[in-house]
Image (cartoon, coloured by chain):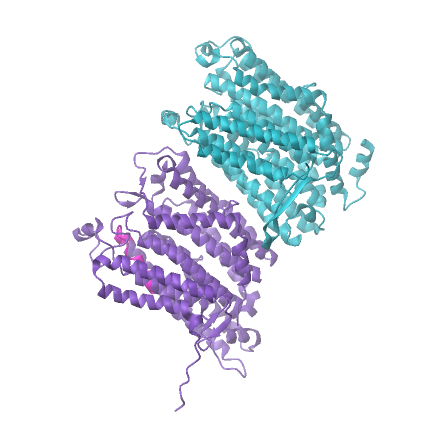
Amino acid sequence: MSDFPFLSVLTVAPLVGALVVVLLPRTRPELAKQVAFGWSLLVLALSVVMWVTWQTGGDRFQFRESYPWIPNWGVNFTFAADGIALVMLMLIAVLVPLVILASWHDADKPSGAPTATDRQPGANRQEGPARAGILASSRRSVPVYFALLLVLECTMIGVFAAADVFLFYVFFEVMLVPMYFLIGSYGGHQRQYAAVKFFLYSLVGGLFMLAAVIGLWVVGGKTFDWQALSQVDISTGTERWLFLGFFLAFAIKAPFFPFHTWLPDAGGAAPAGAAALLVGVLDKVGTFGILRYCLPLFPDAAKQFAPWALALGVIGIVYAALLAVGQNDLKRLVSYTSIAHFGFIGVGIFAFTTQAGTGAVLYMVNHGLATGLLFLVVGMLIARRGSALISDFGGAGKLVPVLAGVLFFAGLASLALPGTAPFISEFLVLIGTFTVNKPVAVIATLGIILAAAYVLWMVQRTTQGTLNPALTEVDGMRRDLNLREKVVVAPLIVLLVLLGFYPKPVTDVINPAVQATMQDIDRTDPAPSVGTVQEASR
Amino acid sequence: MTELKLPSIDYAALAPTLIMLGAALLGVLVEAFVTRRHRHLTQLTLALLAVLAALTMVVLNADDRLITIGGAIAVDGPALFLQGAILVLAAIALLLIGERTVERGGAFVAQAAVTAESDDDRRQAEGSNGATEVYPLTTFAIGGMLIFVAANDLLTMFIALEVFSLPLYLLCALARRRRLLSQEAALKYFMLGAYASAFFLFGVALVYGFTAGMPGRPAGVDFATVNAAVTESPASPVLLFAGMAMLSIGLLFKAAAAPFHVWTPDVYQGAPTPVTGFMAACTKVAAFGALLRVFHVGFEGARWDFTPVLGVVAVLTMLVGAVLAVTQTDIKRLLAYSSIANAGYLLVGVLAPSAEGISGTMFYLVAYGFSVLAAFAVVTLVRDADGEATHLSRWAGLGRHSPFYAAVFTLILLAFAGIPLTSGFTSKFAVFGPALDGGQAWLVIAGVLTSMVLAFPYLRVVVMMWLSEPGDSTPTVTVPGGLTSAALMIGVAATLVLGVAPAPLLNLAAGAAEFVR
């Protein structure tokens, strides 16, 4: 069974699905949704089979397949997954069907609620409130929305499954296109501005990476194969530049402070489902890229720049958390919380201990689940109220108790309450960091306190307290979660609790990959202080 | 009196050029003898058949590596590859030129002598059939380009330059609408072009003078002599540098490289759009083909001297093209500045000191030619009552009105922006890779930085088309006739195929990257 070309089939399948969805008759949008949903379940089933086939404790890279693509440049369709990629693939496969289900009616009605940004003066506005009427009348294609989601799934899977640097770059860049249209065509207000900002930021990072990719190809002897390249010895000066080229792209993608400014705009403007994928998966490409490319390929440079990266991570944790506290727009608030969480992941990666590294990868998964859930729930709330402003809510729990409860749970998971999955990852990151770098760990811990502040305050202002009388006049607010929405949130809640108590199946997969990555860093420098601490912590 | 001895002529090797020039002469006769009603069809068929025949001959000659007619023409890998490229792109351009259903009577003025803006002019604009002289003119231009990329000495190159430039000047003036703009463009192009040609000629003279300083060898302007002189001649290199600089000015003008680019936006905007497409695709191929030959064969020995200077020109070209593209509000001017920036990327490929650099540049030329022709094909379709609606604000909401053409144009713009899986990305890689390999990291970094700037204007058009609401003035897209559809589809298909599976063309280019000397 392990000879089955899992990864390429997994990559291509959603693309085929997207084609099918687009080719369906335009008059039957419901059919398009059902087909898209069914197709994403198919992908999920396939990845579950892959998860079962995975040999824990086997090779670092499994499911390897390779077909020639552009022999002139040594480019191959090489797919292979290590433990880190495998768990991310699972995350994608789980999230996409739920997102499709959650976005069932997103494309039906004209674009969404006014957001806080529209009321902020001077925020590069492209559409005034006066245009809202025109916007409301614009019709948007339902099948295309779901096709774009499937195309996005294809590129996301590809980016994690690629083991050829060129192929990785291709998916990395192409990923922008479906997301750009999801935000730009189906988003809320300021969607144009947000979409262009998202695209340009990512493209700038991508082009720096392109220069580094070409550089790596030249010094690596004209091959793009990851395994061959990881054996190449690069002179320190060159390595530093190449590292920076890759790191910049990933830091923008992740995003780390100070490259984060696009995320609140994009997250705030994107439709909730797309936002969940954007923050839940797309941004993980940045942290995944650092683990897969920056560290093993440029170990010396990685060690040199680690203090800087740690500093960026810590600043991100505190700064983004402070900004999150001050947000008055729900989706922007969630976006800022994510930036803080990415700070944690960054710290975990650059602490260079297996514990922190495992924590960081686990965090990537848990954050995808928790923030994905948070975004989806917030999206349900916004869809009911027709507004994303926190001040437009108040006491919503009295009208929609179940929804409020789920929001509360998602918030708690996102602030890493013990018993939910993110707690374990945050804890691992903090312990792992503490053993090597106490100041960083101590400051990072501040982030937990701030997280409690922004989450609890947000929950309090929206769902608790006295009922905002305006809410009762909104029809949507009288409907609590329907069956479809319950089906969306239930699996995520179950997973978050399950992994909160028993993360072993996931950590068993992650751990060897992280250990191997840590060994990659020490490969050319056998006795650094990091290594000894790592030994001690085992 | 010494007997004049004819040089041996390999007619088969010269066949593509001869076919094109012969067809052009035949076209002139067609003008005289065929009735007006049948002229258009006859001319178009003749031109297309000639291109096909020439292309067939190029394919049959594919293995030729020789120098013929007394050393004037070199038929080698790059020459054949570029001739093939010119012919294929010219065929697509001819389809656009021949289109007569998008606009009644075609894109060309019926009688160029009618005073612009007069009553007569308005009558002709309303639907008289366009002048059919454009076909012989185009065919002559193609013939000149074929010689240009195969010229083995500087004088032949100069003559070829004139042969393909003069028809282009004329073609620029023949737009059916906005004729003043078109005539202004033609005059500008002609004046500056003549000026650049003079520089080129002066450069040839100086280089000739330089080669005269070589002991034991006659002076000459064929590339073998120039090549030998550059490495061996004891003469002062001042003549060489001055000559090289002036030659470069002449060639860089045609290639639209900064600071010799100022004509480009005006001419691209004023010329009839099919001709703009033809210039953007084929003239670029010809100009860079000549640049490759001059610098990789003639002045190879002076690489260390010209690389920094041309490198600065390349960086300047990329910067000017990218930065000024951001401020454009007219789609044709935007594409013109984008074409300038692309000239910069191509120069990066020219400066890569290896066979990969040559093949990368050639690949880039073909890929870019297909995309740019498709882009201008779309431009010809977006129109209102006054002809093409080229102002960008008029494109707002096009995606709602005509999703198919907006999607096609988006794909082309993404290709220009260098997004993977389009030819724009593979071609950038094809020139940046060898450049970095050859130690020209600064050029690659400049290329990457300007690509970021350049992405913005492309993206703005995409936003215009898809994310803006259509206004009352959003023009409709005319349903294209068969010819434009064919041109558009070929261009788009090539943009995709060269992005997804570039290996065959890369192989072809790699196998053709060796000049004969």
A435 is higher (above) or lower (below) than B108: above
Kindly indicate which chain is depicted in cyan in the rendered structure. Answer: A
Residue B34 % position (x, y)? 23, 63
Q: Residue at x 69, y 25 (%)?
A: A445
Q: Is residue A37 left or right of residue A299?
A: left
Quarter assignment of residue B159 = bottom left
Quarter assignment of residue B327 = top left
User: Residue farthest to the front?
Assistant: A1
Q: A387 or B403, which lies in front?
A: B403
Image quadrant holding the C terminus of chain A, namely: top right
Q: Is residue A283 visible?
A: yes
Residue A9 % position (x, y)? 59, 38
Residue A426 % position (x, y)? 69, 26
Q: B352 or A238, which lies in front?
A: B352
User: What is the drawing colour of chain B?
Assistant: purple
Image quadrant holding the N terminus of chain A, namely: top right
Q: A91 or A483, which lies in front?
A: A483
A422 is higher (above) or lower (below) than B479: above
- Is residue B170 part of the magenta span, yes or no? yes
Give the extent of the magenta segment.
B166-181
